Amino acid sequence: MDSTPSAPAKVLVVDDLEEARWVLSNLIQLAGFAPVAAASGAEALARIRHEAPDVVLLDVRLPDMDGFEVLARAKAHDKALPVIMVTAYGETRDAVRAIRAGAYDYVSKPFNNEDVVLTVRRALEEQAARRKAEQELKEAQERFRNILMLAADAIISVDEDQRIVIFNKGAEQIFGYRAEEVIGKPLELLLPARYAEAHRRNIEAFSRAPETVREMNKHGEIYGRRKDGTEFCAEGGISKLIQGSTTTFTVILRDITGRRRAEKALREKDELLTMVGAMAHVGGWEFDVRTGKGTWTEEVARIHDMDPKEETGVEKGLAFYQGKSREKINTAVREVMEQGKPYDLELEMVTAKGNRKWVRTVGQPVREGAAVVKVTGSFQDITDRKRAEDEIRALNATLERRVAERTAELEAANKELESFSYSVSHDLRAPLRALDGYSRMLEEDYGDKLDEEGRRLLGVVRDSSQNMGALIDDLLAFSRLGRKAITAIEVDMNALVREVLNELRPVAGESAQRCVIEPLPAAWCDRALLRQVWVNLLSNAFKFAGKREQPVIKVAGHHAGENVYSVSDNGAGFDMQYYDKLFGVFQRLHSNDEFPGTGAGLAIVRRVVTRHGGRVWAEGKVNEGATFYFALPKGAANG
């Protein structure tokens, strides 16, 4: 089967000398890339903006601006663009300056052709590996984001315009909205109208502040508004994440309506203690400031591993804390008694049985006139929550480690691929070129001295060496498919097929004139890769139907839970008993004399389609034609 190579990488050659541009452009083209030339810095920057080259070969000396200024502007436009500086031989200062300024590498004039090609190829392969690693990191971050979505507290992220971008399950439970109802809408939707403007100002001030985390209850209570219009008191914190020029704000919010109700009940003495005791893992307590004696509910006693009947008080309660936790609770208790300052702390304690637990303790002053006479509060065992937070942090660290390991694996794989490419292109191609060249010289200089059989055998040698070269090219094209990152967009398949048909029309002849294209569904895919699929399938159809007096080629497509496409012809067909060889690399069902080609075309079709999450198959009969199908999922390609 025939094979047409995929679209070559675009290399921008920037040099004010016409001869140098010509030499480099020809060298780039012979290496299988697509050269684009520019004679000045301004022209180079214009081509970078409008033609998006994959690599830039940039001369240091230019008439309108030096190469370092062009490099700086190019990097400002696309910091990931690989720029290879071309320096004068011996000018090590220029080379060092180029690397420090962000150049990928440099080559020196007069340059070695092989070094230039290898440097360009290495830049392209490393760029592809980097993009793949970035995609995997993005997927790891998305997995971590999914874990956050399951948290019980409300986790809400907004962009710089204060529009909601993340709304987890906890937020759905608290606010009564489904995530799809609020994503993309202003945060004001979740706030009482009287607080909306103040909240907006607070976030704007926080965006300019040096700290990255801030308590939201620091200057008073905050309230949320549910979907049904009811309001609730909440507490939480806000953090900001700055990535480049983008800032994302994330709020972790808890509905504390129940706790406020419990605190009110605590002030109503026995009624409060009864309510709090019924709450899971939450209890109530109080102590007299003058005597230091206190009481707590059964739940608080249970958390301390104490008998509920045993007397307690301030000193006894403080004795369960050690180290920094003891320092925090001592300060908080002193301030609530002396200054009437309430506290809300998360502390580690050691129970009467030696068990370590994390607890949340809240204390509120009770006044008689100006004096604090009593302190009441709530007490909650948050050990499970703390353990869950530790597990999330550990999982995040594991994900980061896996990303790093995967990146290292990718780098090793790329080095192996680079070695393979060099071996194929240098060690195999050079002998083949020599074999073909000497055979041609022998044919030209001594052809008249050979008999007919000698000339035939010499022709066989030349044809075989050229076929071997084509096989090597196809093998490289096939291997590159596994490394090329998929960039999925919505593609108009009708326009793409017509574009390919117009390109093939000069060589397809009568077959192209008789090609019928039925309406095709659009697909979410990589346009360049799918273009290669259509080129290979249509080229095969034209080739195998070309010997018919009236060739018929038909392109069709339809929806069937997936997007299905087909290319049919009335040509030579194939025997279905050899179907398993049809999509293999270099597997041919026809001789080269009948239908020339290397047999890589259908293998490339299968590789591209399966990388998009699709499938390929075919039907055919000998001398009655064939139909080749491929199907793509309706969603985005997963690469």
Image (cartoon, helix red, strand yellow):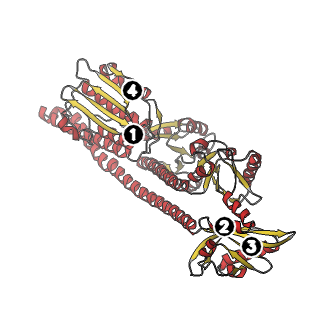
The location of residue 267, given as percent across then percent down, is 75, 66
Alpha carbons under labels 1 and 3: distance apart: 77 Å
- Residue 365 in view: yes
Amino acid beneath label 2: Thr
| Towards the viewer: 515 or 303 | 303
Classify 160 as above or below 100: above
Q: CA distance from mark 2 to mark 3?
A: 26 Å
Q: Position of residue 508 (x, y in %)?
A: 32, 24
User: In the drawing, what numbered circle is on residue 503?
Assistant: 4
Residue that numbered label 3 is attached to? 332
Q: Which element is circle 4 on?
A: helix
Q: Nearer the viewer, residue 109 or 570?
A: 570
Label 1: state its secondary structure. helix
Q: Nearer the viewer, mark 1 or mark 3?
A: 3
Q: Nearer the viewer, mark 3 or mark 4?
A: 3
Sequence order check: which comes first, mark 2 or mark 4? 2
Is 328 situated above or below 472? below
167 or 277, which lies in front?
277
Q: Which is in the foreground here, disc 1 or disc 4?
A: 4
Q: Is residue 533 above or below residue 371?
A: above
For label 2, the SS is helix
Classed neighbour count for the residue bearing mark 3: other residues with Cα under 10 Å, few (<14), some (14–19), many (≥20): some
**In-front residue for pair 190/160:** 190
The residue at 82%/69% (across/down) is: 367
Which tag, 1 or 4, sits closer to the chain's start? 1
Pick the quarter of the image with the N terminus.
top left
Q: Name the residue carrying label 1.
A: 30
Residue 135 coordinates in the image, percent (x, y): 48, 50
Name the quadrant of the C terminus.
top left
Q: Choose top left, top right, bottom left or bottom right for residue 210.
A: bottom right
Q: Which mark is residue 274?
A: 2
